[in-house]
Image (cartoon, grey):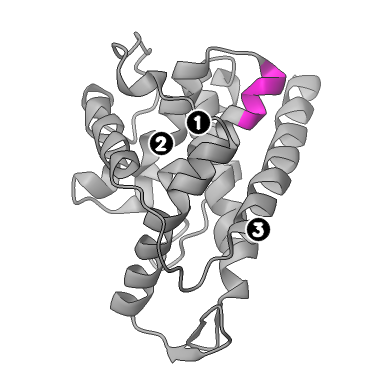
Amino acid sequence: MASSVIHICIANEINKELKRDNNKILIGAIAPDISKLLGESKFYSHFLDNVNNNIPNINKFLDKYGNYLDDDFVLGYYIHLYTDYLWFKYFIPNIFKDNYIKELDGTLIKYTRETFKYYVYNDYTNMNIQLINKYNFPLKIFYEEIPSIPNIISEIPMNRLDLIINKTSLLIEEAKQGKKYIFKIDDTIKFISDSKEIILKEINKIYEDN
């Protein structure tokens, strides 16, 4: 999955155009990952077709919650799922092919789940500080009271949103600049920019069709 910081950057860039309640959208944009903190499968929270496929089924989400996209939290949740869809379908294949992980220097490392997780989360930690600085990262959601959010999404425990907010705050505090293994910052910035345009176009299309 894309990092919490990447999710917030994309949602924040989208909302610069939409001008909705930013706190609610940003909380929605990290909310699906609460399943991981609770030790639960992503199957329900990320609307997956099966447990071995990380790509969310966007239509499955829209079939259930498409009529609720006027709610800012639900819209943020949609942005998260669409970001993960783009991340796993188009971004990750560039660094993970034929059971090998491609390092920035071109070295191919045999894939194991543990190695991939180590590389990904190390790079997230080292990229976060650059993304925070570039995107004038909105920090209000981490020190303001959680706004009142309607209990619409049934796939996550809405009364535990503080868990994902606090975890994301901790990740930001731990951000540092160091060696990156597989992600180029320029590629990540391009992913954020492209995702913003793609998702914003889809949101506007949904609103026009309704």
Check disc 3 and report its element: helix, strand or loop: helix
Q: Residues within 10 Å of mark 2 (few under 14, many from 20)?
A: many
In which quarter of the view is residue 185 placed?
bottom right
Instruction: Determine the CA span between mark 3 and mark 1.
Output: 17 Å
Q: Quadrant of the C terminus?
A: top right
Query: Residue beneath label 1, please?
Result: 137
- Name the amino acid type tagged 1: Phe
Query: Which range is magenta?
Result: 13-18
Q: Looking at the image, do the residues carrying marks 3 and 1 touch, with CB atoms under 8 Å apart?
A: no
Above or below: residue 192 compared with residue 182: above
Instruction: Determine the CA span between mark 2 and mark 3.
Output: 23 Å
Could you tell me if residue 44 is visible in this image?
yes
In which quarter of the view is residue 121 placed?
bottom left
Q: Residues within 10 Å of mark 1 (few under 14, many from 20)?
A: some
Query: Residue beneath label 3, please?
Result: 186
Above or below: residue 41 compared with residue 98: above
